[in-house]
Amino acid sequence: MPSGSADISSILDRILDAATDNLRIAKILVQMGLDPNNVTWDAIFNRLLEIFVHNITLANMFAAVGAGFFVATLLMRTMVPLRVANMIGCAFFAVFGALSANVSTFLLYLLLLPINALRLRQMLKLVKKARHAAEGDMSIEWLKPFMAERKYRRGDVLFRLGDPAKEMLLTVTGKFLVKEIGVEILPGALMGEFGFLTPDNRRTGTIECIEDGQVLTITYDRLLEIYFQDPQFGYYFLVLTSQRLLQNIDRLQKQLAAARAATTNKIA
């Protein structure tokens, strides 16, 4: 026998001898039907195999598979597959409870199934809404009940550049003008959302009413509550501000290109 194998065998034997001297381990060996004073690794392995084979039943097989799915939930990083694995595990454990005539286990995991199904459905709806938000198809009609109505007449200034910002506005009727860049805002558009994001909550432009209209307003404090409570709105708000920034960058690039072209023509 190679010396390496002999060394490993002797180490394992010493470990087993030391373990059998421990009173608790000796009691476990006795419960397993083994003699602590005359035990070998082969005897332990054969006894464990015998116990395993003896306890292979249909109910225990369902429990083992269910336990496997529950362990899998600990390894998953996203909620949708986690919920699916949890539901499958609950189903297997419910069958285990039914086959083993364990009413409490059966009822517990049977009740967990619809709860996980409900949460999974809510998560899938949230993912779907997030996709719609990314595609620009999302409506914020549901936000209107949290908003207050306000009317403006032509010539009214809603706010000026640098003013303290405390609310966001949604246009319902009329027309409004961002004076610094000359952009008209039509019904159905948000105004003042950048003030919600700036560190000092200041207005980033001046908006004037150029056609009598109506707006809906919501304070930033209320907006912040909804932002954290509803991930759908949070994602929509992120997409909205990103699109607005890209539009502003595109507008500036066009203005710079026009200014360069005018300068070139003057020089020519």
Image (cartoon, rainbow, N blue to C red):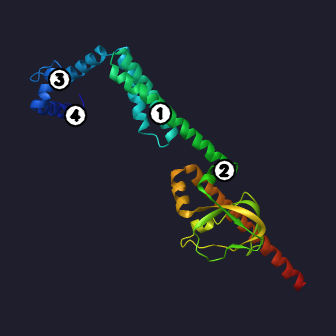
Label 4, residues with CA under 10 Å away: few <14, some 14-19, many ≥20: few
* Quadrant in the picture for residue 241: bottom right
Q: Nearer the viewer, mark 1 or mark 4?
A: 1
- Mark 4 sits on what residue? 8
Mark pair 3, 2: CA separation: 74 Å
| Residue 13, x across and y down, in percent | 16, 30
Residue 184 lies left or right of residue 109; in this view the side is right
Choose between 216 and 19: the one closer to the eye: 216
- Mark 3 sits on what residue? 40
Q: Nearer the viewer, mark 2 or mark 4?
A: 2
Mark pair 2, 4: CA separation: 73 Å
Mark pair 3, 1: CA separation: 47 Å
Residue 18 lies left or right of residue 177; in this view the side is left
Which of the image's four quarters has the C terminus? bottom right
Mark pair 1, 2: CA separation: 29 Å
> Does label 3 or label 2 sit earlier along the sequence?
3
- Mark 1 sits on what residue? 116
Position of 245 relative to 232 (above/below): below
Residue 62 lies left or right of residue 126; in this view the side is left
Mark pair 4, 3: CA separation: 15 Å
Q: Label 4, secondary structure: give it.
A: helix
> Does label 1 or label 4 sit earlier along the sequence?
4
Residue 141: which numbered mark, if any? 2
Q: Nearer the viewer, mark 3 or mark 2?
A: 2
> Does label 2 or label 4 sit earlier along the sequence?
4
Label 3, residues with CA under 10 Å away: few <14, some 14-19, many ≥20: some
| Residue 69, x across and y down, in percent | 43, 30
Residue type at mark 1 is Asn
Choose between 74 and 16: the one closer to the eye: 74
